[in-house]
Image (cartoon, rainbow, N blue to C red):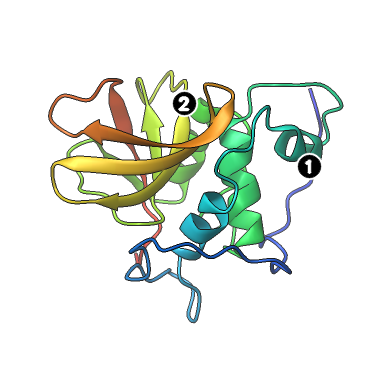
Amino acid sequence: GINVTMSSTYPASTTTGSTGTDASSSTSAVAGTSTSQIVNVAMAQKGNKGGQKFWSWWGYNYRVAWCAIFVSWCAEQAGIPKSVIPKYQGCTDGVSQFKSLGRWKDSSYTPQAGDIIFFDSPSNSGHTGIVVRCDGTTVYTIEGNTSDQVAERTYNKANPSRAIAGYGYTGQL
């Protein structure tokens, strides 16, 4: 394992990505910070294959499963505090951290841009990503390590292709 010392906030980003997403409506729990900025950061990484920039940022010199590391990297780049999006490299650990922050929502919740989606089950989550938007029936995401790349995906809330465990809520508490 790796010992990680965590500070209370991610450092502010020095780079920002911009895309034409409609993610600008989410407001973070942190004054002056929009959690939808994580969507812009993530979308700017679309097409990255292999994820080396993400898993090496975490401290690995070899490839590891990197979907959760991708979410953590994007949160740091967007300047989102760890009290809103915790730093995690394992999906089940991410669920636990969101729960301990009082930021866990089950799969019946309608997510907003910038929320974090988890798949499979809360006690054994095997994948995570970032919500781009939700129209009430379809959840649109951007994910790392999906077919070993950063890519957009869609899930029908009522009958998803992969079970939705729940969401890390990033809005006002």
Residue situated in front as seen by the camera: 118 or 130: 130
Disc 1, SS: helix
Instruction: Look at the picture and state if 15 lies above or below 136.
Output: below
Would you say 35 lies left or right of 11 here? left
Instruction: Look at the picture and state if 17 lies above or below 46.
Output: below
Disc 2 crowd rating (10 Å Cα; few below 14, some 14-19, many 20+) is many
**As shown in the figure, which amino acid type bears the numbered disc 1?**
Trp
Q: Residue at x 73, y 57 (%)?
A: 7
Q: Residue at x 35, y 57 (%)?
A: 113
Question: In the image, residue 3 lies at what x, y percent?
Answer: 81, 34
Would you say 63 lies left or right of 41 here? right
Which quarter of the image is occupied by the N terminus? top right
Disc 1 crowd rating (10 Å Cα; few below 14, some 14-19, many 20+) is few
Q: Residue at x 45, y 44 (%)?
A: 98
Most extreme residue toward the right is 61
Q: Give the mark, 1 or 2, whose residue is nearer the N terminus.
A: 1
Would you say 157 lies left or right of 144 here? left
Q: What's the CA distance linking mark 1 and mark 2?
A: 19 Å
Residue situated in front as seen by the camera: 78 or 8: 78
**As shown in the figure, which amino acid type bears the numbered disc 2?**
His
Question: In the image, residue 166 lies at what x, y percent?
Answer: 31, 35
Q: Residue at x 53, y 65 (%)?
A: 18
The residue pinned by badge 1 equals 57
In terms of image quadrants, where is residue 112?
bottom left
Can residue 160 be seen from the camera position used here? Answer: yes
Question: In the image, residue 102 lies at what x, y percent?
Answer: 39, 51
Can residue 88 be seen from the camera position used here? Answer: no
In terms of image quadrants, where is residue 51?
top right
The residue pinned by badge 2 equals 127
In terms of image quadrants, where is residue 55?
top right
